[in-house]
Image (tube, grey):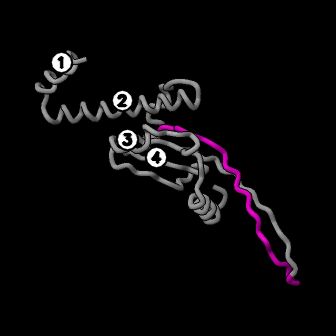
């Protein structure tokens, strides 16, 4: 291991600052990819799918989690004669979570409509504060605030 460190130090001495920065960023990407690979193995029983790590659309998103959320709610209404009746409503939403390693963000979508973005500022921060601790249940859990946002978007734009 010491010999490897010495070889790496010799290589770094020969590189310029810009080359070192590119090498560092590439290393961070490889670390992030490995952490995602470990997550996929634990959660889905398979290692990295090459298709998953390609840029899947112009937004550079890698899908990491999916669930279906059924939103049930109760609405009490009044007839014209002021007698009450109730209506139960149910909406189903496909919840998809994506990671963007280029912009160091998590994107949360309900039926392809973005309801939350978590920004980390750098891939290094994302690795330390998110990717090292990925948990499927945390990714697909929907907070009360997120539920309100999804309901508001649904009311504003119709069925998402």
Per the model, the C-alpha gap separating discs 4 and 2 is 18 Å
| Residue 14 locus on image (x, y percent) | 11, 25
| Residue 141 locus on image (x, y percent) | 59, 49
**Which residue, given by chain and number where applicable, does mark 4 sit on?**
106
Per the model, the C-alpha gap separating discs 2 and 3 is 14 Å
Start-end of magenta stretch: 62-82
- In front: mark 2 or mark 3? 3
Upstream in sequence: badge 1 or badge 2: 1
The vertical placement of 1 against 144, above or below, is: above
The circle drawn on residue 128 is: 3
Residue 92 within the magenta-colored segment of the rendering: no
Mark 4 neighbour density, 10 Å: few (under 14) some (14–19) many (20 or more): many
Between 9 and 101, which is closer to the camera in this rendering?
9
**Which residue, given by chain and number where applicable, does mark 2 sit on?**
30
The vertical placement of 53 against 145, above or below, is: above
Per the model, the C-alpha gap separating discs 1 and 4 is 36 Å
- Residue at 88% x, 80% y is 83
């Amino acid at each position: 291991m010491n010999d490897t460190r010495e070889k790496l130090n010799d290589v770094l001495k020969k590189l310029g600052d810009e080359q070192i920065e590119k090498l560092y960023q590439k290393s961070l990407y490889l670390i992030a990819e490995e952490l995602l690979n470990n997550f996929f193995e634990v959660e889905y029983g398979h290692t990295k799918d090459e298709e998953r790590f390609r840029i899947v659309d112009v937004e550079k998103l890698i899908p990491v989690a999916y669930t279906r959320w059924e939103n049930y709610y109760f609405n009490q209404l009044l007839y014209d004669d002021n007698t009450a009746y109730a209506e139960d409503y149910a909406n189903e939403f496909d919840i998809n979570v994506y990671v963007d390693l280029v912009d160091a963000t998590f994107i949360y979508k309900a039926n392809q409509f973005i309801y939350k973005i978590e920004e980390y500022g750098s891939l290094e921060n994302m690795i330390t504060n998110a990717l090292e601790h990925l948990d499927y249940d945390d990714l697909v859990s929907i907070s009360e605030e997120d539920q309100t946002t999804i309901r508001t978007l649904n009311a504003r734009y119709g069925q998402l």
